[in-house]
């Protein structure tokens, strides 16, 4: 499956490929033709690295002093809202319009991998369901990314707080996510790290839109070369073709949509095990089920939607345009019972969150435990800093059983 969608692509950027201006210090403009490379690093715009930090006003002065005067001349620094290894995210207010924004300040040398991939994508995109880069300031040692400020919180936090959640609500969310993906894929852009904490509500109101954020692992492929080979992603959301070390396309994003949909309707993960090898083997075989009390009220059509995304062979998987045309989505789940799934979903989500404190202990005991017993629900749905590491995949492929499974899958695909 290629990355190009041929119909109804909204808001195509200008032919220049750039929609955001970069402000450089005098005498430091880049050479013409110089481009940025595509590195991989997680990007949190609002809750940077899942560690939101609200500082009292007296602490803000310390961060103001670190900002380039060109930035502070235009934006008033209000509060520190996030921090990463080489970055800080602050809430700011435009001095003239009083419009709030977020600015991500990144160390140019230490955090080079943080911003290059993001900037190469965000400078090109403009879509209502994708976080917008407003402008960029660059100095000798810092990069300042001025972004839209999403204040409505993360997807699952909203579901827990809402009190009611139906299949119709789920399809409204998925329509926005799929519309954003269709746009990205039409430009040859793959997100490669879609997960619930990267889907933020724009504002706290009930009519808020969802925005796709965090493009630190994204990739842009030139026309005619839609294949990628880099091993990257978040363990529970990674597509089987990446684990199998096959060249892959933007279809990996649709696999992630299938995982997110499963969680949306149940509050549980389709593939869930603290032991990475067992987890990856489940994903490689698309081993999931609809067993359990929490699935009895979910419609057959919703399950059909997930089944057409959680397919091992990416060529058989729905693309974003096809997913938008699935009857469950187009009818806003009109044929479903419209039963309130909130109680079951929120209980499952809160159960995982309540056991986050045991996450590290759980992971250590799993490593030392030689039994084959699965260790589920020992952490929240938030993926924290966990990433799929190439060395993990190397170890996975050295497992004789995995080798046999991959050989069997390869044979069945070509038979």
Image (cartoon, rainbow, N blue to C red):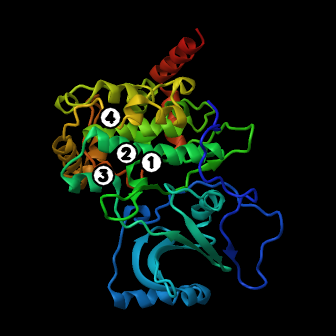
- Say whether marks 2 and 1 touch (CB < 8 Å): yes
Q: Quadrant for residue 105, please give it.
A: bottom right
| Residue 368: mark | none
Q: Is mark 1 on a helix, strand or loop?
A: helix
Q: Is residue 159 above or below residue 244?
A: below
Residue highlighted by disc 3: 156
Front-most of residues 35 and 86: 35
Q: Earlier in the sequence, mark 3 or mark 1?
A: 3
Q: Residue at x 42, y 65 (%)?
A: 150
Residue highlighted by disc 2: 172
Q: Which residue is drawn at 19% across and 41% down?
A: 340
Q: Which of marks 4 and 1 is nearer the N terminus?
A: 1
Q: Quadrant for residue 290, please give it.
A: top left
- Say whether marks 3 and 1 touch (CB < 8 Å): no
Q: In this view, does 153 lie above or below 224?
A: below
In space, the residues marked 2 and 1 are separated at their CA atoms by 7 Å
Q: Where is residue 406 in the image (x, y as percent from the top left)?
A: 52, 21
Q: Where is residue 358 in the image (x, y as percent from the top left)?
A: 23, 51
Residue highlighted by disc 1: 176
| Residue 333: mark | 4
* The N terminus - image quarter: top right
């Amino acid at each position: 499956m290629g990355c190009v969608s041929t119909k109804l692509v909204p808001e195509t950027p200008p032919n220049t490929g750039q929609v955001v201006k970069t402000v450089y210090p005098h005498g430091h403009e880049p050479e013409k033709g110089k481009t940025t490379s595509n590195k991989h690093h997680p990007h949190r715009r609002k809750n940077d690295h899942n560690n939101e930090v609200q500082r009292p006003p007296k602490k803000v002065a310390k961060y103001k002093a670190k900002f380039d005067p060109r930035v502070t001349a235009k934006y008033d620094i209000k509060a520190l809202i996030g921090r990463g290894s080489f970055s800080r995210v602050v809430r700011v207010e435009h001095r003239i319009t009083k419009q709030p924004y977020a600015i991500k300040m990144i160390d140019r040398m230490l955090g080079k991998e943080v911003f290059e991939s993001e900037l190469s994508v965000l400078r090109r995109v403009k879509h209502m369901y994708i976080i917008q880069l407003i402008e960029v300031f660059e100095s000798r040692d810092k990069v300042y990314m001025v972004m839209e400020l999403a204040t409505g919180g993360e997807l699952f936090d909203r579901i827990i707080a809402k009190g009611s959640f139906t299949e119709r609500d789920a399809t409204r969310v998925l329509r926005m996510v799929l519309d954003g993906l269709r746009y990205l894929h039409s430009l040859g852009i793959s997100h490669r790290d879609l997960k619930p904490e990267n889907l933020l509500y724009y504002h706290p109101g009930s009519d808020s839109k969802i925005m796709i954020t965090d493009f630190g692992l994204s990739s842009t492929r030139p026309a005619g070369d839609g294949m990628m080979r880099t091993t990257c992603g978040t363990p529970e959301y990674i597509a089987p073709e990446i684990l199998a070390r096959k060249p892959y396309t933007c279809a990996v994003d649709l696999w992630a949509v299938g995982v997110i949909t499963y969680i949306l309707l149940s509050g549980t993960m389709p593939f869930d095990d603290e032991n990475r090898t067992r987890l990856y083997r489940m994903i490689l075989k698309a081993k999931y089920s609809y067993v359990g009390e929490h699935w009895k009220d979910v419609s057959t059509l919703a399950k059909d939607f997930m089944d057409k995304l959680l397919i091992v062979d990416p060529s058989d998987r729905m693309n974003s345009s096809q997913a938008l045309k699935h009857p469950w989505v187009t009818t806003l789940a009109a044929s479903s019972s419209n039963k309130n799934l909130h109680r079951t979903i929120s209980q499952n989500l809160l159960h995982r969150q309540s056991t986050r404190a045991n996450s590290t202990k759980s992971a250590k005991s799993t490593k030392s435990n030689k039994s084959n017993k699965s260790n589920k629900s020992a952490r929240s749905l938030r993926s924290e800093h966990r990433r799929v590491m190439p060395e993990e995949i190397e170890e996975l492929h050295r497992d004789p059983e995995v080798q046999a499974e991959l050989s069997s899958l390869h044979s069945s695909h070509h038979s």
